[in-house]
Amino acid sequence: MARYTGPRLRIARRLGTDLPGLTRKLADRRPYPPGQHGKGRQRFSEFKKQLYEKQKLRFNYGVGERQLRNLFVEAQASRDPAGKVLLRLLEQRLDNVVFRLGLAPTIPAARQLVVHRHIMVDGKRVDRPGYRVRTGQEITVRPKSREMVIIQEAVENPTLRLPGYLTFDAKTLTGRMESLPSREDTPVQVQENLVVEYYSPRL
């Protein structure tokens, strides 16, 4: 499935929650789904509840359906609860780490920085947004890119607070993953058990 490039607030309103990785705009400004009948009463089947929870992760982290499914398969093979492992794997994506460090206003903006080779991991340029950042690795902005307006504005006005698993030096634009992300570090209001229920019968 192709990456979503349409109106971002529309997705947040449809799913009924803020998606800080997708957009800075808040869904609660108009707390009802978009469209002519958005203010009507919605009926949620069990499948629809599961689907919406899965879609929250897919749109917030900007991953395709196949990518999310593959991450779930990996999470399910772990000894730890699959839902929590899935959230951890999503938080470890390089584009998300760049966003959580406050170097970009959204994950799509962070992805662009990564793809355009503005980001370095342990001193080497990495251009894969899905690169998995490990504990102890250092993420920094390439020296020639440190004066970019988008980076400077993001650092001055971060979208989210710095999570506990990261440290960041604003002077050198350098961050480090000090530990693996925990469930509490996930910025999206999601019921991961419903995501597990969605995928389990489909594998």
Image (cartoon, rainbow, N blue to C red):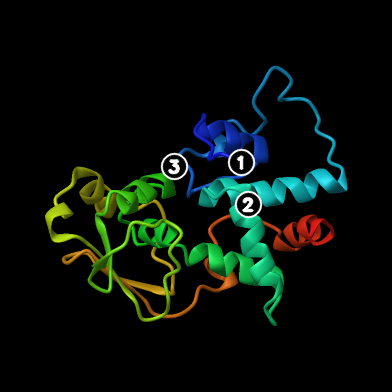
Q: Is residue 106 above or below residue 86?
A: above
Percent x, y of residue 154: 29, 50
Q: Which residue is mark 3?
A: 24
Tell me which label, 1 or 2, sits earlier in the chain: 1
Q: Is residue 52 above or below residue 173?
A: above
Tell me the kind of residue under disc 2: Arg
Please state which of residues 68 and 41 is positioned toward the viewer in this rendering. 68
Q: Are marks 1 and 2 in contact (CB under 8 Å)?
A: yes
Please state which of residues 202 and 102 is positioned toward the viewer in this rendering. 202
Residue located 36% across and 81% down the image: 136
Percent x, y of residue 117: 26, 54
Q: Is residue 58 left or right of residue 194?
A: left
Tell me which label, 3 or 2, sits earlier in the chain: 3
Residue located 70% across and 17% down the image: 36
Q: Residues within 10 Å of mark 1 (few under 14, many from 20)?
A: few
Q: How many labels sit on residues? A: 3
Nearest-to-viewer mark from 3 and 2: 2
Residue located 42% across and 70% down the image: 133
Q: Is residue 48 above or below residue 131?
A: above
Q: Give the alpha-carbon distance from disc 1 to disc 2, as whole Å.
A: 7 Å
Helix, strand or loop status at disc 2: helix
Q: Which residue is mark 1?
A: 1
Percent x, y of residue 115: 33, 50
Q: Which residue is mark 2?
A: 66
Residue located 27% across and 74% down the image: 122
Q: Residues within 10 Å of mark 3 (few under 14, many from 20)?
A: some
Helix, strand or loop status at disc 3: loop
Tell me the kind of residue under disc 3: Arg
Please state which of residues 5 and 67 is positioned toward the viewer in this rendering. 67
Tell me which label, 3 or 1, sits earlier in the chain: 1
Q: Is residue 108 left or right of residue 59?
A: left
